[in-house]
């Protein structure tokens, strides 16, 4: 199994999917064991080289529609890739599981890291998320984009973990400091440094990163999720609606309240 502490390594698929995995709305976190734990196994090859390259799909992607914008073309290609990936996952293709992890590990890790504020927790939980997805892939019926379904599994698993950690001695300061110095490792994000002009951009950007992450951990998990999805990872409203199940008006209203709350929490850190 891929270890997300070294997210450049190859992924290994669980030996077989479990028919008893609950859907993404009810899966408790930490129930999906790693293939390296007792009772599970991984048969995917781990040696580097040509055999670790993603398996070519028999169906070649059609040419891109020249009438579409570059963003729309990229989106269409990603959707076709995901459809092929899902089909192979449902057929039990272990190489497809490796491709799934390599394609989405940074996004999933980034979401969990921003939500939890703790690197080790995010790494461990990311592995749980991918195993849960592998075992529950049969429940994905192709309604909406695959990655919004993946995000829904990840966000529900994360919120369950936050509930478990609530009230426990769970210190984040060292991780938050590390996040400020290595923001690129927290997954895709809108650059904060680019919003700070002048030669002090790097210093001020890191300071703002740290303040925002500390403020995020003080928000209600639902508000925290909206900030991360929209303002950190830059997802479209339509995708966030699919992930959260919120109506557009409710989503925008809650996001506004979340931004106001976050601003109030980070202002003292910037003064």
Image (cartoon, helix red, strand yellow):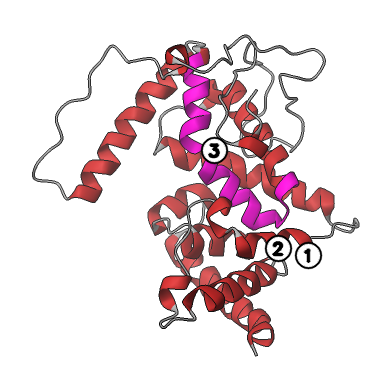
Q: Which comes before the other along the chain, label 2 or label 3? A: 3
Task: Decide: is 96 above or below 224.
Answer: above
Work out how far the residue at label 2 is from the one at label 1, CA to CA, in angstroms: 5 Å
Q: Secondary structure at mark 2?
A: helix
Classify the position of the N terminus by image quarter.
Answer: top right
Q: Residue at x 44, y 63 (%)?
A: 190
Residue indicated by mark 3: 105
Q: Residue furthest left?
A: 67
Q: Residue furthest front?
A: 199
Please give the range of residues in magenta.
95-121
Instruction: Out of 49 and 37, give the one closest to the viewer.
Output: 49
Tell me the tag on residue 71.
none
Name the residue located 82 percent from the left edge and 15 percent from the top edge. 38
Residue matched to label 2 = 176
Q: Residues within 10 Å of mark 3 (few under 14, many from 20)?
A: many
Q: CA distance from mark 1 to mark 3?
A: 24 Å
- Near mark 2 (Cα within 10 A), the count class, few <14, some 14-19 or many ≥20, is many
The x, y position of residue 16, in whole percent, is: 63, 11
Furthest residue to the bottom?
A: 271
Between marks 2 and 3, how big is the CA–CA gap? Answer: 20 Å
Image-based side of 245 in relation to 61, left or right: right
The image quadrant of residue 209 is bottom right
Asked whether disc 2 touches disc 1, contact meaning CB atoms under 8 Å apart, the reply is: yes
| Mark whose residue sits in front, 2 or 3 | 2
Magenta stretch containing residue 133, yes or no? Answer: no
Using residue 126 as the reference point, say whether residue 232 is left or right of it: left
Query: Label 3's element?
Result: helix
Q: Is residue 97 above or below residue 103?
A: above
Give the label on residue 173, or none.
Answer: 1
Q: Say which element carries label 1.
A: helix
Seen at 66% across and 31% down, the residue is 3
Q: Is residue 193 above or below residue 167?
A: below
């Amino acid at each position: 199994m891929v270890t997300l502490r070294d997210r450049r390594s190859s992924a290994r698929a669980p030996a077989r999917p479990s028919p008893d995995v609950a859907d993404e709305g009810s899966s408790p976190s930490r129930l999906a064991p790693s293939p390296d734990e007792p009772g599970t196994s991984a048969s995917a090859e781990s040696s580097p080289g040509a055999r670790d390259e993603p398996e070519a799909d028999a169906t070649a992607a059609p040419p891109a529609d020249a009438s579409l914008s570059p963003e729309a073309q990229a989106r269409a290609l990603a959707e076709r890739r995901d459809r092929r990936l899902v089909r192979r996952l449902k057929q039990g293709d272990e190489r497809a599981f490796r491709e799934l992890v390599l394609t989405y590990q940074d996004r999933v890790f980034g979401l969990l890291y921003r939500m939890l504020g703790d690197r080790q927790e995010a790494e461990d939980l990311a592995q749980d998320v991918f195993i849960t997805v592998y075992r529950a892939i049969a429940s994905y019926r192709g309604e909406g984009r695959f990655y919004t379904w993946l995000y829904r599994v990840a966000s529900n698993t994360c919120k369950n973990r936050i509930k478990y950690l609530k009230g426990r001695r769970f210190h984040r300061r060292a991780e938050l400091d590390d996040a400020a110095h290595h923001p690129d490792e927290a997954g895709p994000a809108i650059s904060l440094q680019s919003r700070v002009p002048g030669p002090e951009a790097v210093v001020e950007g890191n300071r703002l990163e740290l303040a925002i992450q500390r403020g995020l951990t003080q928000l209600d998990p639902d508000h925290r999720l909206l900030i991360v999805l929209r303002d950190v990872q830059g997802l479209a409203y339509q995708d966030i609606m699919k992930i959260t199940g919120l109506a557009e008006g409710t989503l925008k209203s809650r996001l506004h309240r979340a931004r106001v709350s976050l601003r109030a929490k980070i202002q003292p850190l910037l003064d």
